[in-house]
Image (tube, coloured by chain):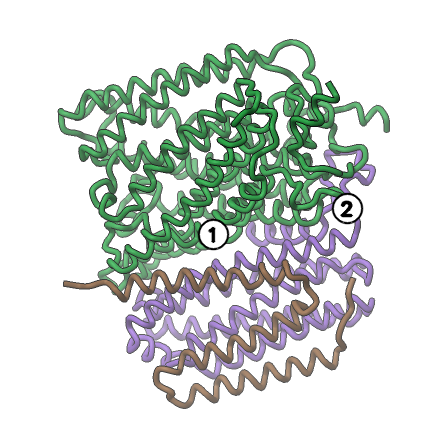
Amino acid sequence: MDNHGSYKSLINIWLFLMFLTVITVGAAQFDFGILNVPIALFIASIKAGVVAYHFMHLKHEDGLTWIYATYPIFLLFLLISFTATDMFSRVIN
Amino acid sequence: MGIFAITGKIIKSIAYPSEMVPSIEEDDGHHHFDPVTEHESAKLGMWLFLATELLLFGGLFAAYAIYRAKYPEMFMDGSKSLDVVLGSVNTVILIFSSLTVAIAVKAIQENRIRLVKVMLWVTIICAAIFAVNKYFEYTYKFSKGIFPGTDIFYSIYFAATGVHMLHVFIGMAVLGILLRKVYKGKYNKENYTAIEIGGLYWHLVDLIWIYLFPLLYLVG
Amino acid sequence: MSEEHEKNYLDNGEGFRSWFFTVDHKRIGVMYLWAIGVFFIIAAIASFLLRAEHLTPGQTIVSADTYNVLFTLHGSMMVFLFIVPGVAASFGNFLIPLMIGAKDVIFPKLNLYSFWLYLAGALIFMIALAAPADTGWTFYTPYSIETGANVILITFGIFVLGFSSILTGINFIVTMHKLRAPGMTWDRLPLFCWAAYATSLLQVLATPVVGITLLLLIGERYFGLGFFDPARGGDPVMFQHFFWFYSHPAVYIMILPAMGIISEIMPVFARKPIFGYKAIAYASLAIALISFLVWGHHMFVSGQSKLINVIFSVITYAVAVPTAIKVFNWLWTLYKGSIELSTAMLYSLAFIFLFTIGGLTGLFLGALAADVHLHDTYFVVAHMHYVMIGGTVFGFFAALHFWYAKMWGRMFDEFKAKIAFVLIFIGFNVIFFPQFIMGTLGMPRRYFNYAPEFQSLHQLSTYGTWIGAVGFILMLWTLMRPLPGKAPGNPYKSLSLEWSMDSPPGTFNFDEIPTITEPVYNYGTKIEEES
């Protein structure tokens, strides 16, 4: 039964997440054209990673949990990429 | 209410694998696995469940990705019509509630029951504020004649935030059940698995929103 | 204490409550067995009527609309109520803890809730039959959006069933990770458990996608979301993508447990160690991983792009490799073994034969050019039934006979069971082999009517159902009337753990958790010394 970190570090992590939220909203005010979505996704992924790693204690979990935490992301990637490949490579007349 | 009751039971049964249904009377401890195994198993089980939740939203993310690429203009316009301020406020609230749940888990490990109660209360209140905000957002959209099915963007908006909202409610129910049990004195530093995996579930609700917020509100 | 230990799990408590509220994995497994058995019989009766309808072209016994309802009922019930939860939930529940040396699954209560959810889903499904769907079990859009039938209720029922299947999968995975007895290392784990692990993996990771798909379909009908509706800018083929992202892996949810059963039975009756243990074990995992990559081969003629057709076709060939590895390993297990043709073994041998036919015809269908001709014909129907009946159901029957003694503590009449086997085997082939021919000649599936030149083949196929039905009834009759006297603990001299205890096992399986010291399939060395 593990007991890690301190309240202070939890709050620091939260402050970091708030900081990233500000960045996300701030970045959205500028138009990066085609990069809009990748930038938003990149920042969101950092936030999600921080939540999973610290708040959800993924840093203390074993390899098995890591596999089951990350494998669905790969499957989601498969679902999107194959479906998109179909949708955008159809020849219409 | 049925779905909440079921979810509560499921969370409980993952957290307390060895609690028996009364009809097998002669339970002389046969179904008790050792506490470390139970704790580890409960966490693994919850992570597996979170994996399924992620893939449940996966269908919506896939639909988003494809239709966004197909109709960029529609998504731009639709996204601009959403209320960024309300969305941002909700993001802050949800991330804050994630913090409070994390603190609650930490506090129960140190037997600080009072702190656990406060933190769980704060989390539930945050969830309620989130829901109220969402209610205003929805009704405002309806008053402007925007419904699910108005166009693909709004369909995705309503479907994704709606399914997410359902998870917020389920999370509130789970946290409520946990809180009640905290008041009954069921948890302490030896026995906190339920709070930990209930917390994991709540973090997932936050995780999903972390993606939904920029994808729906910001990339316009 | 000592008195309790003499009680087996069947005697320990009687009456409805002692079963319906039990957390004993064996009782839950048995309840699943009864439930799926009932649904199997209902769905089989539907197919019996379907075949009878085809005795003559045009209307024979039912109207065209009833025909549509019947094949939807048959398909969706067989798939969602029988074969997907089927072997995994019944025999998986019964056997996994026994095989790995545990007293129960890790989450016994959750296991019970899964069963209740299964019943709830089945109940909703049955209520939906009041206005039965006529869409086929695949619920393809746009028809499933437009039809007046009760699509919402039936899909919601399937959603609940999916929930049950996810929870069972989670339970099994965690059980196999955390509750293996000391010394039960991964390379000593019985192959049925490996197969069940791969199955659970698919249940956990694929089912949520069909869950959201069906929810979106419900949303489509309620709100007109438009994702799958071309008139609103959506794409009906996307529904098929999402649907098959689950439903192709689901095919392996159906077949993998049966493969596990065969891997258990083969070495016992060939009295040889299984050939290529690791290859079979890893092939299960490989199937679980690759099966997520091939779903598009169900959609070659649905308007999918040519590029993705080619990609899916190529990967489809890849998934045949681990399957073939298993078949070769089973054959090699038989080589120079001293084979005993028990009923369970007969079903297992038939499995290999029929499954190979089913698998190879699957390769025809995976080939793009051939599929364009064969798609949606009886060839597909025959292929699918050779895999699902010739594979899964024959594996299921093999398990019913093989673990009969363990489950019920009695023996059955082998001779009658063998006659039943012969009838079922002949009946099955008479039903479905002609369908390969009809399919190549162009007879489309799901059609009420047909051209007169198909009549003789259709009739042959229908006669097959009669032979098969007689065989099936004889099998049930045999199994329902066990021989007098108690079964020995280990009638087949198997070496795996579930046979090391009394038949039927006590409520808590093991008085003391055993320690495993050697591989499971050590046949040919140890047995002879003991006997």
Q: Residues within 10 Å of mark 1 (few under 14, many from 20)?
A: many
Q: Which residue bears the numbered disc 1?
A: C206
Q: Which chain is in brown here?
A: A
| Residue B41, position as x, y percentages in the image | 69, 53
User: In front here: C462 or B5?
Assistant: C462
- Identity of the amino acid at label 2? Phe
| Residue C287, position as x, y percentages in the image | 47, 47
| Residue C214, position as x, y percentages in the image | 40, 52
Q: Secondary structure at mark 2?
A: loop
Marked residue chain, label 2: B
Q: Is residue C351 left or right of residue A11?
A: left
In the rendered image, the vertical position of residue C367 relative to residue C30, given as above or below: below
Identify the hue of chain B: purple
| Residue at image location 47% in from the left, 62% down from the top | B57
- Pick the quarter of the image with the C terminus of chain C: top right
Q: Which residue bears the numbered disc 2?
A: B33
Q: Answer yes or no: is residue C123 visible.
A: no
| Residue C452, position as x, y percentages in the image | 13, 25
